Structures are given as structure tokens and as C-alpha cells.
Amino acid sequence: MNNITFDTEVIIRLILFTLFFALLAVAELIWPRRPTISFRGQRWLANLGLSVLNTFTVRLIIPIAGVTAALWAQDSGIGLFNLVAWPTWLELVLFVVLFDLTVYWQHRIFHWLQPLWRLHRVHHTDEGYDLTTGVRFHPLSILLSAALKTGLAVILGASAAAVLVAELLLNLTSLFNHSNVRLPAWLDNILRLVVVTPDMHRVHHSTNFTEHSRNFGFSLSCWDRLFGTYLQDPLCPRATMPTGIAGYSGVRTRGLLALLIQPFVSGPVVSGVTPDRVKES
């Protein structure tokens, strides 16, 4: 794992993403948590189109992001882990935990600051909720996130293996916790002690403002409990709980181009940490 190259990273990411995506897609068909909406094909085309665009955008604009940045920091002797004789396993665990903590706070800030919310809102305006929602992010949002994660990798001097593991966990758990898979209640309750489950994160996509401002975690579930943003159950039944953002529905809001320009046009609702921040955008 310490000899990871760019080509190796790409192959590992592609194989794991494809396998996990296929597994969840089949699981959604066999054990759906909520009814499948009629325009699923339109959503998938736009959501996956964003995912492909984001991948190329990050590689083009921030070519040193992620594993490449970690390799550069190691070669240059930069970062905390390169200044102290840490055991390899401890470096990996520490980076994965700190990486996920950073993602948690990044998510909260993207809800709190108006310009960032406009970008992140693209993720929340999905009229459905399935594994493709987990890759539905605006390219500018992804670029900002990539820059933050790259900075964290360099500051800590994380190994290429640690960065790859952390990013893979984030990507795969994002697919999982956005999936429309029905888990037995007992299994969900056990899993959410450690990781964010679909039923746990779906609450965050509720149209109810209080629920929309809870359960920010992506991978580890502990941060919401630690920082007081955890909510066990929504007010509405999970199978019928309304999701999305009011006013964003219909054919004209679903296309890839509509998602790309959405942050730059007027919209009906803006997020915030407290209700008094909600106003017309």
C-alpha cells in the first residue's frame, strides 16, 4: 500500500466503486426502503453525469489532490506524521478519523454559509433518494472539498495509503447511506453505533427544517452524537417522509445543465443552522 501510484489509485477506486455501486443497485431493487419514483432514469442520468464531470474536473484543476498530494508531502518530509515516528497503523487510523471529522464540519459549514449552501443545495434538491444521490454534488463544491482534503493530507503528512483508505471510505459510505435499501431495524440500530446508515442520513434530507439540520455525518456516526446534531427518528414514517427542497421539482430542474446553473439562479429556499437564517434566495 505504501507503493501506491496514480494508476494504481485509479484502478482501485474504479473497481471498488463499480462493485459497490452494482451491489447496492441490486439491493435497492430487491429490498427497497421507499417506492421507486417514475423518473428514476432522468435522475440517474443527471446524478451520474455530475459524478463523471466531477472526477475529470478535480483531476484537471487539482491534479495533486488526494494520494498525489500525500506522496509529494512524504517525499518532501512535510506534515506532522513525517516529523514524528508514528506507527503506520496509528497514522492510518488517526488520519481516517480526522479526515471524517473534517468532512463533518465541512458539511455543517456548507449548510451555514449562504454561498456554500447554494453549491451544496444541488445535493439536497434531488427529488428522489437513492445511491446516486450520494454522488450528486456540484463541481465547485467538489473542488472546494478536494482542496480542503488535500490541505489536510499535506498538513498531517498522511501516507498515500491512509489518504486512499479515507477517501474510499467516504465515497463508499456516501453510496451506502444514500441508498434506498431496507435494513432490518435491529441491524440498522447496531450499524449506526459506528457508521451512518441510510435511515439515519435520510433524516438529513427531510423537507422539515429541524430534521434537515441534523445527522450531518457521512461515514462515522459518532460526530453527530458528540456535537449534538443527532436525531434518531423523523416525525413522518420513514417510507413516506418527504425529501428534497420545496420548489425544486419537475423536468426543468432535473437535467445536468439545470443542476450546473442552479447555484447561480434564484431559488425558493436557503438553508441555515437556525430558522432565523432561512430567507428567500
Image: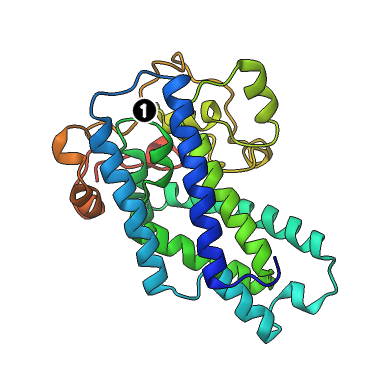
Location of residue 224 (image quadrant) = top right
Percent coordinates x, y for residue 110 in the rendering = 44, 51
Within 10 angstroms of label 1, few (less than 14), some, or many (20 or more) residues? Answer: many
Percent coordinates x, y for residue 13 in the rendering = 52, 56
Up-down relation of residue 96 to residue 181 (above or below): below
User: Depth check: 272 or 141 in front?
Assistant: 141
Percent coordinates x, y for residue 265 in the rendering = 18, 51
In the image as oriented, which residue stretches furthest toward the left? Answer: 252
Residue at image mark 1: 243
Query: The disc labelled 1 sits on which kind of residue?
Result: Thr
Q: Does residue 135 appear in the picture of this structure?
A: yes
Up-down relation of residue 197 to residue 254 (above or below): above
Drawn side of residue 99 relative to residue 35, left or right? right
User: Depth check: 110 or 34 in front?
Assistant: 34
Percent coordinates x, y for residue 257 in the rendering = 19, 51
Drawn side of residue 211 relative to residue 159, left or right? left
Q: Does residue 66 appear in the picture of this structure?
A: no
Q: Residue at x 14, y 39 (%)?
A: 252
